[in-house]
Image (cartoon, rainbow, N blue to C red):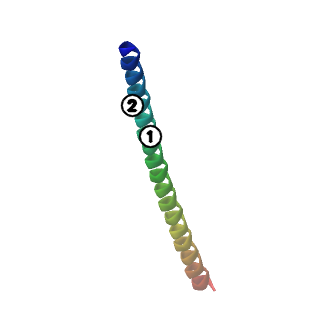
Amino acid sequence: MARHGVCAERSRENVCSLLSFEIERGACHLSIIMKIAAIEQTLNYLMEYEQGKLYEEFNRERERVH
């Protein structure tokens, strides 16, 4: 019976270790997803900014021609 107790304790430790690893891996995945979202948001902002600059330049050129 003592042997069964040791095996059960090791199994519990293995399960806890595996769960801890999965939680850390999940947190890592979440961190990566958050970083990708931040990069995507920055790129969207830069594209909108550049589009606005091109629009302003187009309007200045159009006014200059007319």
Residue at position x 47%, y 53% in the image: 34
Disc number at residue 17? Answer: 2
Q: Which amino acid does label 1 sit on?
A: Ile
User: Percent position (x, y) of residue 17?
Assistant: 39, 31
Q: Determine the residue positioned at 57% across, 79% down.
A: 61
**Seen from this angle, which residue lies furthest right?**
66
Residue 40 position (above or below residue 51) = above
Residue 26 lies, with reference to residue 6, above or below; the image says below
Considering every residue shown, the one lying at the far front of the view is 1
Camera-side residue of 16 and 50: 16
Give the number of marks: 2
Residue 15 image offset from top left, x and y in percent: 44, 28
Eyeballing the image, is 58 above or below 43?
Answer: below
Q: Nearer the viewer, residue 66 or 46?
A: 46
Which numbered marker is on residue 5?
none
Query: Mark 1 Cα within 10 Å, few/some/many (few <14, many 20+)?
Result: few
Question: Which quarter of the figure has residue 64?
Answer: bottom right
Quarter placement of the C terminus: bottom right
Side of 1 where 65 appears, left or right: right
Q: Nearer the viewer, residue 21 or 14?
A: 14
Which of the two marks, 2 or 1, is nearer to us in this view? 2
Residue found 43% across the figure and 48% down from its top: 31
- Label 2, label 1: how far apart the Cα atoms are: 10 Å
The image position of residue 51, as x and y in percent, is 56, 68
Within-10-Å neighbours for mark 2: few <14, some 14–19, many 20+: few
The reply to whether callout 2 and callout 1 are in contact (CB within 8 Å) is: no
Q: Which of marks 2 and 1 is nearer the N terminus?
A: 2
Tell me: 36 left or right of 55.
left
Q: Identity of the amino acid at label 2? A: Ser
**Left or right: 3 in relation to 48:** left
- Helix, strand or loop at label 1? It is helix
Residue 23, numbered label = 1
